């Protein structure tokens, strides 16, 4: 079986869903963030200082967590799609609130193509972490693999 990578229309759909999630994150729009995470026992979110297993745990945590700084900026965002139903989004982020570099990885799946909210795309797994900034870098955003 051959899986077609990075179909332009799928990349556009996932980018739109990812950007909606990022807007909701910065705006602390909890209902939109909840809607874009799969609400099922199998979903996993590894946060900076916490772990949630299951949609109910993510929603409970989200309802009481601190919002991200409004100065959040994304760097080196890479979206990769696998066929028409699965994708990953990897990005780095920074803000004026810390000198640390954030890293965020999300696995997205189209769970219901008839769903009108971003054509059924939902985050089914996520991991967020912070590290010391390794070196100065220029902001870069891309769709697809990073240049070698």
Image (tube, helix red, strand yellow):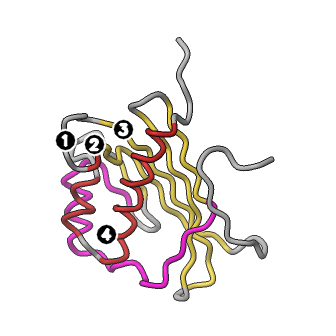
Mark 4 or mark 3, earlier in chain: 4
107 over 27 or under it: above or below: above
**Residue 121 or 12: which is nearer the viewer?**
12
Instruction: Determine which residue is flagged by label 1.
Output: 115
Instruction: Using residue 31 as the reference point, say whether residue 111 is left or right of it.
Output: right
**Residue 65 or 80: which is nearer the viewer?**
80
Q: Quadrant of residue 28?
A: bottom left
Instruction: Determine which residue is flagged by label 4.
Output: 24
| Residue located at (68% from left, 74% from top) | 132
Secondary structure state at the residue bearing disc 4? helix
Mark 4 or mark 1, earlier in chain: 4
Query: Which dot marks residue 95?
Result: none
Secondary structure state at the residue bearing disc 3? strand
Question: Is the C-beta separation of discs 4 and 1 under 8 Å?
Answer: no
Question: Is the C-beta separation of discs 2 and 4 under 8 Å?
Answer: no
Q: Quadrant of residue 103?
A: bottom right
Q: Position of residue 116 (x, y in %)?
A: 19, 46
Query: Which dot marks residue 109?
Result: 3
Question: Is the C-beta separation of discs 1 and 2 under 8 Å?
Answer: yes
97 over 114 or under it: above or below: below
**Mark 4 closeness class: few <14, some 14–19, many ≥20 residues within 10 Å:** some
Q: Position of residue 66 (x, y in %)?
A: 32, 80
Please tell me whether residue 73 belongs to the stretch shown in magenta.
yes
> Mark 2 to mark 3: distance in Å?
10 Å
Mark 1 or mark 3, earlier in chain: 3
Q: Quadrant of residue 34?
A: bottom left
Secondary structure state at the residue bearing disc 2? helix
Instruction: Determine which residue is flagged by label 2.
Output: 119
Q: Which residues are magenta?
A: 51-76
> Mark 2 to mark 4: distance in Å?
17 Å
| Residue located at (76% from left, 49% from top) | 147
Please tell me whether residue 80 belongs to the stretch shown in magenta.
no
């Amino acid at each position: 079986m051959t899986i077609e990578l990075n179909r332009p229309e799928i990349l556009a759909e996932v980018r739109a869903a990812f950007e909606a999630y990022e807007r909701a994150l910065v705006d602390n729009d909890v209902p939109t963030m909840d809607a874009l995470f799969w609400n099922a026992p199998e979903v996993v979110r590894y946060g900076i200082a916490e772990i949630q297993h299951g949609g109910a745990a993510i929603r409970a945590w989200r309802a009481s967590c601190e919002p991200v700084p409004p100065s959040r900026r994304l760097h080196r965002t890479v979206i990769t799609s696998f066929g028409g139903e699965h994708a990953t989004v990897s990005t780095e982020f920074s803000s004026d609130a810390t000198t640390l570099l954030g890293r965020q990885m999300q696995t997205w799946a189209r769970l219901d193509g008839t769903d009108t909210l971003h054509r059924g795309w939902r985050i089914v797994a996520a991991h967020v972490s912070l590290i010391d900034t390794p070196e100065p870098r220029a902001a870069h955003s891309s769709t697809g693999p990073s240049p070698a």
